[in-house]
Image (cartoon, rainbow, N blue to C red):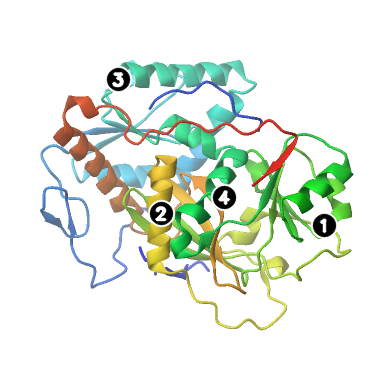
Amino acid sequence: MTLETGCVQDQGAVKGLSVGISGGGMNGEERSTDSHTRPRACLCGHSAPGGPHTHSQMSGRRVGFCVSDKKRRRMNLDAFADFCAGHGVEVVEIDLTQPLGPQGPFDVIVHKLSDVIVEAEHDSQSQQLLANFQSYVSAHPSTVLLDPLPAMTQLLDRFASYQIMSQLHNSLRDWRICSPPYLEIHSASDLSSIQQAVVAQGLSFPLICKTRVAHGSLSHEMSLIFGAGSLAEIHPPCVLQSFVNHGAVLHKVFVVGDRHFCVERPSLKNFPSGPCDRKTIFFNSHQVSKPESSSDLTALDEQMPFLPPPSSKAVAALVRELRVQLGMALFGVDVIINIHTHTLTVIDINIFPGYEGVPQFFSSLLSHIESVLDKQTSAGPQAAGSPGSAQPTGGPSAATTGR
């Protein structure tokens, strides 16, 4: 069972990214998980049991999808297209290698251009594809972009996204929400400098080491470092983050516009706090935290007292704050509960995640598309363009910096 508020057990138990950017898991079968759920209401006040209300203004709408083949399969785009067709909405798969003009017009474009953005750093063909996409968006300001390119770009850079995370303890202090101390390693430095920076920034062992680029297969390759000497094994650019014991439970918060869903996943087990001589553990986060994961790294070595799930109100506050800070509607947040303080701790933010374990994803996404189009229609032509667009944040240029 998956809930909007509160977490439950899932049933499956770069560089600086300086490319110039401007503007702007589902099985396909929708099913109710709560027979007492109230009928959803559309913006104009009609109730819509079981899904979005089909209005005349939605009939004939065209939604373009620009995603990789892998993402297309994971979200079962064919099934979503069939679902939308039942509500009078046409889903069109966008081919970036072809001119976009003849493929349009589009009322909304839903995209995940992570591959193209990252590859555009060094590949001229990707640069051209990205430029063509931007040109089309700029020439069609009434087309809503989910999500704005600058907002997505900053989440591809952990230096930028971790800076956002580090500020949450100020804006959400009343909810006891925080993120672990972290350190940016921009380039290769001598070991003693890194060790001194770890101490200066208040990090504590063990440390999690993650790549700077938060996309692609390498972004899931991480390491758990137990002592200062092992810092010689890191490969900059990367991020070091204090590891927080959390009872081997990860709470993935999936956001779709005004709705969010919390799904429980396996995670790394507890480790003794403080430095030790243990060898560095290298692992793939996908293999550890997928619903079907089974790993020695997730098997607790001790009996754990009951750890309460995240407060539904605190999670809702977190989602509201991140929607404002990011200017995005489709993203995921990885949170854990500190076993000692029970503090809600944010450890990562993800672009347009897989939504595995969220059977309401299709209806929620179509409802959000309806919502943004209704708002655009109500506001008039001056509201055309990408709502909630955010400017990218640049990372500091020091060799090693932290928050």
Q: CA distance from mark 1 to mark 3?
A: 51 Å
Which quadrant would residue 294 be assigned to in this image? bottom right
Label 4 or label 3, whichever lies nearer to me, is: 4
**Which element is circle 3 on?**
loop
Q: Which residue is mark 1?
A: 280
In primary-sequence order, the first of circles 2 and 1 is: 1
When the figure is inspected, residue 308 is found, relative to residue 66, above or below; the finding is: below
Q: CA distance from mark 4 to mark 3?
A: 36 Å
Q: Position of residue 398 (x, y in %)?
A: 72, 33
Q: Is residue 29 left or right of residue 384?
A: right
Q: Which residue is mark 3?
A: 140
Q: CA distance from mark 2 to mark 4?
A: 15 Å
Picture quarter with the N terminus:
bottom left
* Amino acid type, mark 1: Thr
Of the numbered discs in the image, which one, if any, rests on residue 319?
2
Q: CA distance from mark 2 to mark 3?
A: 30 Å
Q: Which residue is mark 4?
A: 166
Q: Position of residue 70 (x, y in %)?
A: 52, 41
Q: Is residue 50 left or right of residue 402?
A: left
Q: How dense is the environment of label 1, judged by Cα within 10 Å: few (below 14), some, or many (20 and up)?
A: some
